Image (cartoon, rainbow, N blue to C red):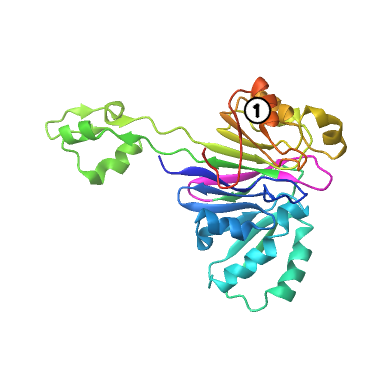
């Protein structure tokens, strides 16, 4: 199968620590790289990850809190210094547009590439990006400022050719695409070989949901039903559930409850409060509800 991975660049929350960087991650899908949120230090983390700056085709910003976007203008500037010429599309809340334009005018005059800002409606579920193999749709969230998550979905692929059968019937490679599309094969003797004998089922499409800052929203289980991997903020443990409610965040247990109700494949925890020196307590709380929960950490890579 083609790669579908999540590279964690930062999984801390607003208050800087020596342990974690602010929110940023790269979603790698079939050779394409997408940056999701861009907190301070994202460029350094990209260097450490050895992911190529020039391969990032789009940036998705969930909301306008500094730990999710303070690194954006520096990233844009560095793209220019590296000689980027390909258009860069940035998706984010409407309010990001004028701020970004002002920063570009002050810090990034004379770029040799186009910065295309696309305002998104954080209150609606809608496809905001699409190519031949992938769609990205928004996930409305509830935070102290307009905020949304992002759902990356693979498009269905074609069946696989059974090479042993194809070789037995000496089927030319030039006919494989037709067979993948459902055609049978007729031999020189007039024997019809049904498509079901010539192909194996296609790989099941994979999906990745990124839910950044949000209070617990049980209703998300509908949109997230059956996703392969869910990243959900887990800023606090149950010892701070009132603080989570006050600041519109979630606990690790609440993230696990959503993962269980949505029947996701695996849950990734992140956006840890600086008050936790050891996030094991968050993992323990989550795994009691949803066993296939995992802690994220800088430079960790997860297969979707």
Q: Which residues are magenta?
A: 131-148
Residue 171, can we see it? yes
- The residue under the point 82% across, 48% down is 145
State whether residue 29 is above or below residue 159. Answer: below
* On-image quarter of the N terminus: top left
Please name whichever residue, 293 or 283, is drawn nearer the observer in this view of the structure: 283
Q: Nearer the viewer, residue 26 or 13?
A: 13
Q: Is residue 35 left or right of residue 166?
A: right
Q: Residue at x 79, y 58 (%)?
A: 95
Residue at point 21%, 32% (across, down): 164
| Residue 33: percent from left, percent from top | 53, 53
Relative image position of residue 107 (x, y in whole percent): 71, 74
Is 15 included in the stretch rendered in magenta?
A: no
Residue 152 vertical position relative to residue 168 in the rendered view, above or below: below
Residue at left offset 72%, top offset 44%: 148
Q: Position of residue 162 (x, y in %)?
A: 27, 32
The local secondary structure at tag 1 comes to: helix
In the displayed structure, would residue 48 be above or below residue 230? Answer: below
> What residue is pinned by disc 1?
259
The relative height of residue 194 versus residue 176 in the rendered view (above or below) is above
């Amino acid at each position: 199968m083609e790669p579908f991975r999540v590279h964690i660049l930062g999984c801390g929350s607003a208050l800087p620590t020596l342990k974690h960087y602010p929110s940023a991650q790269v979603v790698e899908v079939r050779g394409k790289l997408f940056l999701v949120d861009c907190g301070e230090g994202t460029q350094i983390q990209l260097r450490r990850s050895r992911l190529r700056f020039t391969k990032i085709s789009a940036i998705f910003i969930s909301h306008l809190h500094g730990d999710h976007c303070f690194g954006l203008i520096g990233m844009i500037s560095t793209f220019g210094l590296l000689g980027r010429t390909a258009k860069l599309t940035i998706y984010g809340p409407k309010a990001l547009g004028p701020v970004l334009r002002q920063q570009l005018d002050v810090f990034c005059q004379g770029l040799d590439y186009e910065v295309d800002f696309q305002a998104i409606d954080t209150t609606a579920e809608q496809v905001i990006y699409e190519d031949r193999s992938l769609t990205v749709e928004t996930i409305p969230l509830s935070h102290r400022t307009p905020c949304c998550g992002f759902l990356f979905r693979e498009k269905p692929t074609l069946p696989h050719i059974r090479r042993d059968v194809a070789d037995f019937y000496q089927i030319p490679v030039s006919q494989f695409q037709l067979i993948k599309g459902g055609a049978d094969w007729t031999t020189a003797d007039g024997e019809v070989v049904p498509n079901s004998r010539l192909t194996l089922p296609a790989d099941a499409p994979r999906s990745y949901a990124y839910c950044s800052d949000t209070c617990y929203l049980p209703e998300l289980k509908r949109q997230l039903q059956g996703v392969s991997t869910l990243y959900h903020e887990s800023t606090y443990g149950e010892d701070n559930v009132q603080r989570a409610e006050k600041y519109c965040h979630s606990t690790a247990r609440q993230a696990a409850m959503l993962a269980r109700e949505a029947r996701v494949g695996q849950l990734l925890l992140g956006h840890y409060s600086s008050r936790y020196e050891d996030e094991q307590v968050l993992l323990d709380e989550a795994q009691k509800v949803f066993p296939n929960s995992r802690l994220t950490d800088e430079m960790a890579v997860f297969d979707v």
